[in-house]
Amino acid sequence: MINTQDILQTIKMIREENLDIRTVTMGISLFDCISDDPARLEMKIYDKITTKAKDLVRVCEELEHTYGIPIVNKRISVTPISYVGANLSSAGYVRLAQILERAAKTLGVNFIGGFSALVQKGATKGAEALIEAIPEALTVTDHICSSVNVASTKAGINMDAVRRMGEIIKMTAESTRDRDSIGCAKLVVFANIPEDNPFMAGAMHGFGEPDTVINVGVSGPGVVAAAIKAAGDCDFSTLADTVKNVAFKITRVGQLIAKEAARRLNTPYGIVDLSLAPTPAAGDSVAEILENMGLACTGTHGTTAALALLNDAVKKGGVMASSHVGGLSGAFIPVSEDRGMIDAVKAGTLSLEKLEAMTAVCSVGLDMIAIPGDTSAATISGIIADEIAIGVVNTKTTAVRVIPAIGKRVGDDVAFGGLLGHAPIMPVREASCEAFIARGGRIPAPIHSLKN
Amino acid sequence: MKAVITVIGKDRVGIISMVSTECAAHSVNVIDISQTVLDGYFTMIMVVEISEMSTSFSAFAEHLAEKGRENALDIRVMHEDIFNAMHRI
């Protein structure tokens, strides 16, 4: 028999601490849609996605009712589109993005991810055309997410791609300037991109994946923050154990939903992504967790250590709760999506440089950060290069999703609405890195002995 | 197969009667009832058997939630597996 206290604890987590399943994401391979006729390619892609995922939203809603837990997002990830449409022109890729948009609307899913290219060593003709198409594709669609992997620990950093992505981000910002440059919120630049990540904007369906798969991303910063508050004035060992215990419970819910969704959709279960994903809602903030540990404001000295403890304990608790773990798995620190982070930026305590340091010990990178609209493409490339270098050298995933908000400067705000939240514009360094970025070529892969 | 019905709100006459009448109407058998006070709110927990339930889980859960809204109560019906998953290894 389940005991009363356990039932009440679960109810409290859902009612008051914003426990939810952040996303159920169905991965769909599009390799069997490849065709040399663009019209046929478009038709096959639309048909495959709308057939395979036709019950996704309905099943997720059933699960919400059965288990009484919200599933915030129902999403789809697809094979990186640059591989599927390899011979398309840039205009052809934009059309394909519109086909994906149509499929998303037909199914009622929140996002389709995978308008992506992997160019860590170099770009194929198809990848180049897809990257070229990103600004327009993200302007004419609302539900499509794009990602570009520009580096890996084994390949090093493709600095030509880093330079190009600085320009592409700027162009995307310009072409969506009437909506606070929201296009950039759907575009992320990666190092060591995972192939089974259910979270946007970086979700894609990788090469070693089955034809279709169900991946689930959990959430629950509010639950962790409440548990730490309740633990009171304890030492670090107890603090880490507290986080582990809660992370275990959160992840078990993710595991249950993943297995049940997979069963009902007759689709293999892939992974649970052990993530603490915040939202702009009160009491759903990673920053609040850090502050409950004893920091007056996130971003102050001690923040990186607090985040390292949190991230590690979440993984340790989560790994035992789930049979297969993958994706990004770590605490996210997207500024615009986390009320505590927004407050810390406004208080002047949390800077871009501190965020960069924090990403060395957590998932996933410089995320949802608004910068002045007049920031040059080269400076954006410099920001990308720094963040990507952290991932490449430390054998981890890092990413950059910055929004140069056209027409805005430090002191202004941008508002994207919904889960994407709102953000104060953060200052960037004025000194130029243009000559560095302009060199082109590749930064060699790092050595993995002589660690220091 | 069991489910857990929780009712949270201001205590008043007839809550148990209302919920158990709904259960009976849907061939849901009440196995256990307990009540407590959580953060100042009356909280009732009912464990029920749903194998013979005459409607779908979603419909039953939505129906009780609606009954709750009409009476200023938060009524949730959740499959027992979520509690087992979280609190049992």
Image (tube, coloured by chain):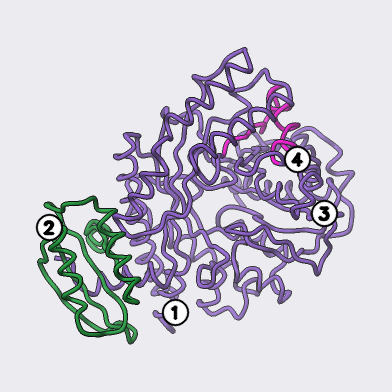
Chain colours: A purple, B green
Q: Is mark 1 on a helix, strand or loop?
A: helix
Q: Is mark 4 on a helix, strand or loop?
A: helix
Q: Front-most of A305 and A285?
A: A285
Residue placed under numbered mark 2 in the picture: B27
Q: Mark 4 lies on which chain?
A: A
Q: On the picture, is A281 further left or further right than A436?
A: left
* Residue at x 55%, y 76% (from the top left corner): A291
Q: Front-most of A1 and A73?
A: A73
Q: On the picture, is B35 further left or further right than A416?
A: left
Residue placed under numbered mark 4 in the picture: A165
Q: What element carries label 2?
A: loop
- x, y percent for residue A320: 32, 54
Residue placed under numbered mark 3 in the picture: A406
**Residue A133 counted in the magenta span:** yes
Q: Is residue B89 visible from the viewing direction of this image?
A: no
* Residue at x 38%, y 67% (from the top left corner): A14
> Which numbered tag is attached to residue A229?
1
| CA–CA distance in space, label 1 to label 2 | 43 Å
Q: Front-most of A16 and A445?
A: A16
Q: Mark 2 lies on which chain?
A: B
